Image (tube, rainbow, N blue to C red):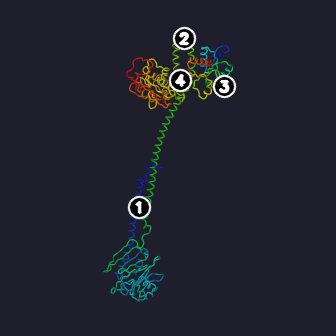
Amino acid sequence: VPVKGQTRWPSWLALAVGLLIALLSVVGCVVTLRVTNEHEHELLKNDVAGAAALVKVTVDDFTVPMGSVATAATLAAHDPKDFAYLSFPVKIPAGASLALLRQDGDSYVVTAAVGPALRPNQDITGGVAETIASSAQSSAAANRAGLRVVPTAVTRTRNAATFGFAVGPPNTPPGTAVYEQLTVPVRFIGKDNPFLNSINLALYGGMTLDPSHLAFANTNALPLHGDVVRQDIAVGTDQWMAVGSAKEPLSGSLARDAGWMILFLGLLIALLVGITLDVVSRRRRYAEVQVATRTAELARSMSDLRDAQTALVQRERLAAIGQMASVVGHELRNPLTAVTNALYLIRASGDLTPAEAPHLELAERELGRATTLAQDLTDFVRPRTPVPEPFGLDQLLEEVMEAAPPPPGTLVRAHIGHLIVVADRVQVSELLTNLVTNAYQAIGAGHVWIWAQPLDGKVKVAVQDDGPGIDPDVAAHIFEPFVTTKTRGTGLGLAIVRRIAEEHGGSVGVEEFDGSGARIVATLPGVAEQNGAVHPRFDEATAAWGTEDEQTPTGAAAPS
Amino acid sequence: MTETNGDHGLPAVLVVEDEEGVRTTIAAILRSAGYVVHEAPDGEVALTMLDAGVSDVMVLDVRMPNRDGFSVLENLPSPPVTILMSAQSLEPEAYNRVRQKVFAHLRKPFRPERLIETVESAFGGEET
């Protein structure tokens, strides 16, 4: 069920918090990467500086530092995989040869060599080096290749091969002199006849030739990793350069990946936190909307319930009134019959004293009232289905006026015309009787006007008096049972009028008009066959009953 | 032909009514009008008295203990001329069953003159 207040978009809070965490993770990532890179750069710089220092010392002193124990140790101290290449040119004294040895158990194998046996700029990649290497499996073999080969490595580590260079004149017999030359090479080589040669030696693999640099490369070093460090080296009048780069990150993989991990985790947390916040916020909004909806429904239900209760109470009240009226009305009838009979017998006996006669008259009069009351009470609740028949309203009114003549001092004028009403004749008779009786009782003495006119296929009957009128507050309830403004009367007459009118599909009401008095109207189903004015004028009244006490009040103008 | 009570040669009326005040005053009014009046306090007694053939006209209340007015009429194949009295309006279904046997219906309270007129015409109706 779609609920008002829900949106497809995440809440601002979730977005803000998620973005903040993401931003922090990016910053963390950048900082960490930077720190790691700086660390790597430092490491690399140290290595290159070490190599450069070595080269510088060596060349300045005219030594061959690559063959020194220190060099081998320095290089061996690094994991070969960590050190990509070191590139620098080397001056090799005239007549001298340079070889690269690899320790293999107790023997040393020439893996590369350069010297008089090799031409300058000769590509010794592959074949030559391989030839030398394969033929110089021992010191003797090295000598045959024209190299003075002496094991020089004194440092051995468990995890790394130790490399050493041996330098010496061709055919120099093996011996300690060589070793001394290595340690004090300047005395051995001399400065007078140097030649400059450039050669690339691969420490751990293939060789490449570069005309101006000696490069140590490792096939495993390619591709090189990130940073490249260069350092210029002034050697005499020459400018040399040491180049270093790491084959792989020098730091551990955790440190290397820390930045990216921070970024990834940060984004993940940002997403999770954002989603969680959004879900919570959506739930809260949903709950708020639900609460509001339910509250409104509850209020509506309460209101409906109150209305229903009021209606029920009203219905129950009327039902109870009706039941009580019925019981009282019926139970009164037997005693009223007995009293009526008894009074009749007293009067029939004919021997009343003059003092007794008025009392009997009083008893008879009051008995008449009680009888009317009982009649009203039972009429009010008697369930009757109207039996409609067409009849002339004027004829019926004459009968009603005969049965309920106006009291002394009251004049009734009527203008009905010949209107045909289709209704239950007995009930309409009751209706008219109650309307005129109500008017009599309202005014005491005065004028009552009765007229009828067709209205939208029905017949509207109006009874108007020039009495005190009806208070607007009372007018709303005047058709309810037992509501009366009079000191006499049961308050049932107009309730009966309403019931009869409504059972005929009509209605009743109090109509306002200019002037004093009250006008009560009722509509009944009818067929108009009027032979008179639609707007009656009562100076031409069709009928009049009763007598006037005094002159017609000027305020009681003829109704229109 | 005016049926008469054998003893007095006068027209006889049976008043069947459980309310004593109503019964005795009706009886008194009818006696004053010159009728011989018998009284029954309920339907059972009325049936017994009618078995003895004491009345030509019956003034019969509807609601009574020990057999109501409708039941009395249903138990009499040829009842006397009957004037029904009731405080309540008549229940249509029950009334329709005995309608043929009812001469007139008086709603309580009624004017004594009306009672006398109705009883008179009941006897008159018998004559025609």
Chain on which label 4 sits: A
Q: CA distance from mark 4 to mark 3?
A: 32 Å
Percent x, y for residue A423? 50, 28
Residue at figure coordinates x 44%, y 32% from the top left: A456
Establish if A459 lies above or below A76.
above
Q: Which sits earlier in the primary sequence, circle 4 or circle 2?
A: 2
Q: CA distance from mark 1 to mark 4?
A: 97 Å
The reply to whether callout 1 and callout 2 are in contact (CB within 8 Å) is no
> Of tags 1 and 2, which is closer to the observer?
2
Q: Quadrant of residue B123?
A: top right
Q: Is residue A494 among the parts visible in the rendering?
A: yes
Residue A352 - label: 2
Percent x, y for residue B99? 61, 25
Secondary structure under badge 3? loop
Residue labelled with disc 3: B75
The type of residue carrying mark 3 is Asn
> Of tags 1 and 3, which is closer to the observer?
3
Secondary structure under badge 2? loop
Image check: A385 left or right of A142? Answer: right
Q: CA distance from mark 4 to mark 2?
A: 30 Å
Residue at figure coordinates x 44%, y 61% from the top left: A265
The type of residue carrying mark 1 is Ser
Residue A25 - label: 1
Chain on which label 2 sits: A
